[in-house]
Each structure stands twice: as structure tokens, then as C-alpha cells.
């Protein structure tokens, strides 16, 4: 039995209604509010239970839906590929309209496709879809749906085209404004990141300069002083003439060995040779053991590596930065936390390498107080290698956890693996 349609608006009444829609659009600055403002007025021209506007991006590949009347998944979806849309023929210009007497029985709609499901979930049976065009270019589509099968025919298609012609320029302007706003936000965020990175790099440069000065003072106060003492001892032996006193020579030899050992410690602190020889995990374990041993504190330290060798594939500069970040975290835990247990975990998670240092100590200082620039330096180093840095409370809200995550690189080359293994055997020998 054919469905009775409401009386058709006379041309003059329809024109007045289109003018009213145009007035209602004035001042609307987003798609959602614009569609809701005119939905009821459009219903007087083309009756509907659901109305939605689909807007394509400039790339013509993605589209976003805005709706009124019924809240469906279409209005909550992120931008979706045009190829997955049930109205793809409209968006690609293959047809100039789509008219479904009963979408639930139309092969155009697939009940197993999540993008098409609202047709069945909300009983959107009769449907009309027409393109939104600006200067001959399709920017989206206007669609109306009714719960009553067979509700729409050629007249509703014609009337919906009138509405689409009115809405298209306005929606085109809204799309341009939205894209300009998003571009401005993106540019502002990029500038903020650049400025933050610049400030962070400046702080890191200052920290490196402080480290250089520290090394210079260590060399001056320790190594240079030891070498000066040895040189003076040799001058005295030479000035004395005659046979060399074995005891005096032994004292000078012992002093030279001590100076060499002290110099080696300064070099080890400045250049992570263990990292280059044996890899990041071993270097971290070595630093953990040495930090606890030198502190003289009763701290139990453990390291668990479950990265399946992924750390060995890190770029050398990245590996050094990671080592420095975790060294700082270990030093903070050993010297400032009052911890009795300290654990380093190296794991893989969803294509990321995740490294964490956790202690059971007193936790972060309260009230925003921080000691020095250590945390800022860790955060800056992380940003310079495109890693995510996080610091907060440990398990159960106790202690402190530092977590670093970065993209997992590809497998290391075989030659590099053999070189590390050979270096390890030579060092062991």
C-alpha cells in the first residue's frame, strides 16, 4: 500500500522557507549548531526522522558526519574513509542522487559493515542522498531518512536538492574556517614544541657546560695535582744524583698508578665505554651496581631485561641519551629517595621499548620543590630523541617511578652483533 505524503509546499511557500533557513544559518560557526538550527525548517520541505550532513576533507579521502534528529554512530565517528561510506557513489560523483525505498533491503547497505549499521539499528528505511556542490566540486552530501518505507520519491529528491544548493556555500565556508582554525592550532602547537625544545636544549647545554667544568676541575684538582707531585719527585731524584732509592722510586710508581686509575674514573664517567662494548642493558646494570656500591647504603638493586635484544639496535646517539637519562634516575633514587629497593625494567610493549626505574623510597618532593635540574635534563634528553618521559609515584603510590618509552628500531645488522660479541670475549679474556 503506498505511503501518503504530506501536501507539497507551493513554490512561493517553499521559497519563503528556504529564505528562513538562510536566516537561521546566520551566525552559526560550527556544523553541529548549523544543522540543528535548520533541521526542523528543512523538515517542512522534506519531512524526515533523521538528517545528516557528510563533509569531505580537502584530500577527498576522508569524511565526517554531522546529524540531527537521531543520535547515531555516524555523528560520533572519527573521520572515515570515503571508500567505506554507504553513500560513496554520491561523494565520488558517480551518481547525482541516491533514493532508497527501504534501505534495510537495499544492497547498497551492508548489515555486517559497522559503518552501515545505523540503518538497521535505528530503522532508517526510506533515504534520500544528494551531493553538496560548490563551483562544481563535491564537498559532501546531504541525507534525510524516514522510518516509513517508500516515504520519498522524485519530488523529495528535487526539494532536497534545493536545500543542498542553499546549504553548500555556507558549509563550504564553515569547512574553510574550521580548517584554518585547525591549521592555526597545529602551527601554534608546533611553535610551542619548538620553543619548549629550544629552552630544553638551552638547559641541556648549560648542564653540559657544567659537566665540562666539573671534569676540568677534577682534572685540575686531582689528576694534575697527582702528576705535578710525581714530576717534583722525579726532579728531586734527578737533582740528588747517585744511585736511585728503590723506596722513593716505588712511591712515585704507586702515585703514577693511582693517578692513572683516577684519570680512568674521570674518563669512564664522561664516556660510557661499557655501553659501546657490551650494550645498553649491561651498561645500566654496571652503573646500578657501582652507584649502590659507592653509596655504601643497604640498597637491593635488580635489573630485568625482556627486550629480546631490541636495545642493541638503537642508534648509538640514542643509546647514549637513554643511558644518561636512566643513570640520572638511578642516581636520584640512590642518593635522595632513602630507598631500600631499586629496580630497572626493560620491556617491549606494542612496538615500543619501555624502560623504567622504580624505587620504594620517599617519593617526589611535595609542594613542587625539586633538587637541581636533573628532571628537566632527563625530560629534555627524552624530547631530543623523540622519546616519551614520565615521572610519578611507583606501585601502590609508594616511591618514585621514571618511565621512558621510544619506538622500537629494526633488528641490528649481523656484523654489529658479531663485533659486540667479539669485544665481549676480548674483554672477558
Image (cartoon, grey):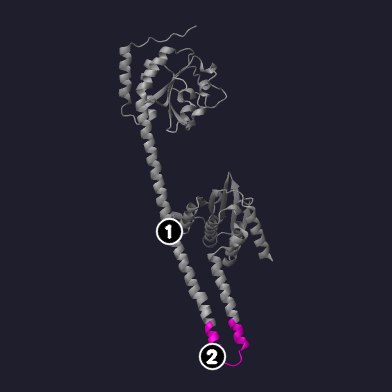
Question: From this viewpoint, which residue is outermost toward the bottom?
Answer: 242
Which type of secondary structure does the marked residue at label 2 adopt?
helix
**SS class, disc 1:** helix
- Res 288 seen here: no
Q: CA distance from mark 2 to mark 1?
A: 52 Å
**Left-right relation of 210 to 112:** left
Q: Which residue is mark 2?
A: 239
Q: In the displayed structure, does residue 35 sit left or right of residue 262? A: left
Q: Please state the horizontal and vertical placement of residue 198, each as a whole percent of the image.
A: 41, 54
Give the extent of the magenta segment: 231-252
| Viewer-side residue, 323 vs 129 | 129
Q: Count neighbours of disc 2 (C-alpha within 10 A) and say few if under 14, some if 14 to 19, many if 20 or more.
A: few
The image shows residue 16 at horizontal and vertical percentages of: 30, 16
Query: What's the residue at 37%, 41% (across, down)?
Result: 184
Q: Quadrant of residue 18?
A: top left
For this rendering, which residue is in front, 102 or 403?
102
Residue 381 is one of the magenta-drawn residues = no
Q: Earlier in the sequence, mark 2 or mark 1?
A: 1
Q: Residue at x 59, y 52 (%)?
A: 313
> Which of the 4 image quarters holds residue 361?
bottom right
Q: What residue do we see at 45% from left, 68% from top?
A: 213
Pick the front one: 90 or 75 = 90
Q: Quadrant of the C terminus?
A: bottom right
In the rendered image, the residue lying farthest to the top is: 1
Q: Which residue is mark 1?
A: 203
Give how far across and how far down residue 309 sits, in percent: 63, 52
Q: In the rendered view, would you say 143 is above or below 327? A: above
Q: Would you identify the image quadrant in which residue 143 lies?
A: top left
Residue 415 percent coordinates (x, y)? 64, 55
At label 1, counting other C-alpha atoms closer than 10 Å, the crowd grade (few under 14, some 14-19, many 20 or more) is some
From this view, report whether residue 409 is shown above or below residue 148. Answer: below
Amino acid at each position: 500500500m503506498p505511503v501518503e505524503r504530506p501536501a507539497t509546499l507551493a513554490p512561493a511557500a517553499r521559497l519563503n522557507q528556504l529564505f528562513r533557513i538562510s536566516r537561521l544559518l546566520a551566525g552559526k560557526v560550527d556544523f553541529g549548531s548549523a544543522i540543528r538550527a535548520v533541521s526542523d525548517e528543512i523538515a517542512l520541505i522534506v519531512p524526515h526522522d533523521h538528517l545528516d550532513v557528510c563533509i569531505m576533507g580537502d584530500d577527498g579521502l576522508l569524511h565526517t558526519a554531522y546529524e540531527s534528529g537521531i543520535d547515531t554512530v555516524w555523528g560520533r565517528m572519527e573521520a572515515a574513509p570515503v571508500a567505506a561510506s554507504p553513500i560513496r557513489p554520491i561523494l565520488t560523483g558517480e551518481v547525482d542522487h541516491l533514493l532508497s525505498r527501504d534501505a534495510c533491503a537495499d544492497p547498497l547497505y551492508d548489515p555486517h559493515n559497522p559503518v552501515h549499521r545505523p540503518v538497521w539499528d535505528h530503522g532508517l528505511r526510506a533515504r534520500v542522498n544528494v551531493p553538496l556542490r560548490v563551483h562544481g566540486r563535491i564537498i559532501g552530501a546531504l541525507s534525510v531518512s524516514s522510518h516509513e518505507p517508500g516515504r520519498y520519491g522524485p519530488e523529495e529528491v528535487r526539494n532536497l536538492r534545493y536545500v543542498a544548493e542553499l546549504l553548500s556555500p555556507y558549509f563550504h565556508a564553515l569547512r574553510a574556517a574550521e580548517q584554518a582554525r585547525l591549521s592555526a592550532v597545529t602551527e601554534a602547537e608546533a611553535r610551542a614544541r619548538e620553543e619548549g625544545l629550544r629552552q630544553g636544549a638551552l638547559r641541556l647545554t648549560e648542564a653540559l657546560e657544567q659537566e665540562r667544568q666539573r671534569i676540568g676541575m677534577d682534572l685540575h684538582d686531582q689528576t694534575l695535582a697527582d702528576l705535578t707531585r710525581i714530576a717534583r719527585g722525579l726532579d728531586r731524584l734527578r737533582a740528588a744524583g747517585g744511585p736511585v732509592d728503590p723506596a722513593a722510586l716505588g712511591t712515585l710508581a704507586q702515585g703514577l698508578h693511582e693517578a692513572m686509575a683516577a684519570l680512568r674514573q674521570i674518563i669512564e664517567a664522561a664516556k660510557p665505554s661499557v655501553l659501546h662494548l657490551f650494550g645498553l642493558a649491561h651498561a645500566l646494570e654496571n652503573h646500578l651496581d657501582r652507584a649502590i656500591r659507592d653509596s655504601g647504603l643497604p640498597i637491593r638493586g635488580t635489573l630485568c631485561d625482556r627486550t629480546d635484544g631490541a636495545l642493541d639496535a638503537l642508534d648509538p646517539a640514542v643509546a647514549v641519551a637513554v643511558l644518561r637519562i636512566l643513570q640520572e634516575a638511578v642516581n636520584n633514587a640512590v642518593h635522595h629517595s632513602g630507598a631500600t629497593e631499586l629496580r630497572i625494567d626493560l620491556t617491549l610493549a606494542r612496538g615500543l621499548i619501555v624502560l623504567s626505574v622504580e624505587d620504594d623510597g620517599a617519593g617526589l618532593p611535595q609542594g613542587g620543590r625539586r633538587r637541581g635540574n636533573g628532571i628537566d635534563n632527563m625530560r629534555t634528553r627524552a624530547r631530543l630523541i623523540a622519546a616519551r618521559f614520565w615521572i610519578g609515584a611507583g606501585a601502590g603510590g609508594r616511591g618514585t617511578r621514571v618511565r621512558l618509552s621510544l619506538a622500537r628500531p629494526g633488528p641490528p645488522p649481523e656484523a654489529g652483533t658479531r663485533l659486540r660479541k667479539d669485544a665481549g670475549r676480548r674483554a672477558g679474556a
